[in-house]
Image (tube, helix red, strand yellow):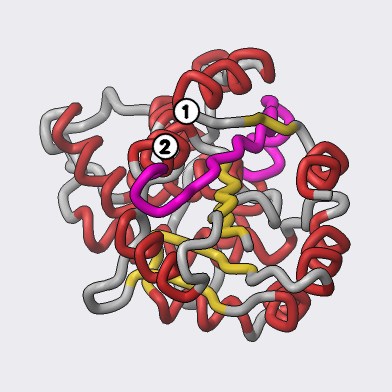
Amino acid sequence: MWIRDGVLVNRMHINAVAFAYAAYAGLKSDSDKVTLAELVNFAMAKSGMSCQQKMRLFNLEVAHCIGDPLAATDLYNELATDAARSAKFFHGAIETLRRLKAAGTKNFITSAVEQKILDQWLTSEQGQYMEPLLNETLGRRDNLSKGEEHFRYVSQLVDGQPIYYVADAEFEIKQAASLKQDFNIMPIGFSHFIDIKDILKAEKLVRTACSAPRVSLKLTTEGAIDCNELILPSQKTIRENLLNAGAVAVVDDFAELAKYFY
């Protein structure tokens, strides 16, 4: 079986931009030095953490500039959900899951978001493709959250058989590697390079989501992300970081991942 995070739907760049806009909207009035690009960089660097964790951590590092992290997290959930509706599955993702399911694996999604958000996603067009191929989606529930609790839960379901954990964030790989012996985990890094064009496409989607009736977030022209401030690691750096974090292997796409499994 395997348990994966963030490597089925190509939306990391959307999540980062949604975080930036949600946090920016929640800045205190005297926090004019914080930029959208800085927030995108922070979200990319902290990928794998929940939005709420990122909001709180940014406050710790930048003098409590986000007035209400919980409200900003709620806004993020709205923006990211709307913007990611047009996100695409990585090439080969559906076919890989189908082959694994047919071979008898148990497939899980693990996420730091609230369980209700994952449940809502399962009713979306994307989720309906996934639901027949998944045994369960694991979000944040009472006494069950991403990380050690999810690993323990899955390990019990598969009687200690290997857990192939496929993740695209250094934080996630480090966490899995630290629990490798406890739950028979094989952390596999998924190296996906995001460029400036991806960020700009994501910004367009997020700005459209901002104008949705239930959000109605007023935007200004000055709010656009300054690409000159973006810090986006190269594919080589991403691969090296995942390996250094404890990945037993790193793949660049589903063609490589399929070879690893089969």
Please name the amino acid that badge 1 sits on: Gly
Q: Is residue 43 visible?
A: no
Residue occupying image coordinates x 83% and y 74%: 102
For numbered disc 2, what is the local secondary structure? helix
The numbered disc on residue 152 is: none
Tell me the distance, in whole angstroms, between the alpha carbons under discs 1 and 2. Answer: 5 Å
Tell me what residue is drawn at x 46 percent, y 71 percent.
Answer: 138
Residue 240 % position (x, y):
58, 16
Residue 164 image point, x, y percent:
59, 51
Q: Is residue 216 magenta?
A: no
Residue 86 in view in this figure: yes
Q: Nearer the viewer, residue 209 or 196?
A: 196
Inspect the image, locate mark 2, and give the three-letter code of the amino acid beneath it. Answer: Ala
Residue at 27 percent across and 48 percent down: it is: 53
Q: Quadrant of residue 9?
A: bottom right
* Residue 246, disc: 1
Q: Would you place residue 60 above or below residue 125 in this image?
A: above
Q: Residues within 10 Å of mark 2 (few under 14, many from 20)?
A: many
Q: Quadrant of residue 38?
A: top left
Magenta run includes residue 186: yes
Asked if marks 1 and 2 touch (Cβ < 8 Å), the reply is: yes
Q: Which residue is mark 2?
A: 177
The quadrant the N terminus occupies is bottom right
Against 255, residue 101 (above or below) is below
13 displayed left or right of 173? right
Which residues, given as a range, are shown in magenta? 180-203
Badge 1: few (under 14), some or many (20 or more) residues near its Cα, within 10 Å? many
Classify residue 125 as left or right of residue 137: right
**Residue 141 % position (x, y):** 31, 76
What secondary structure is found at the residue carrying circle 1? loop
Q: Position of residue 257 (x, y in %)?
A: 77, 43
Nearer to the camera, 35 or 163:
163
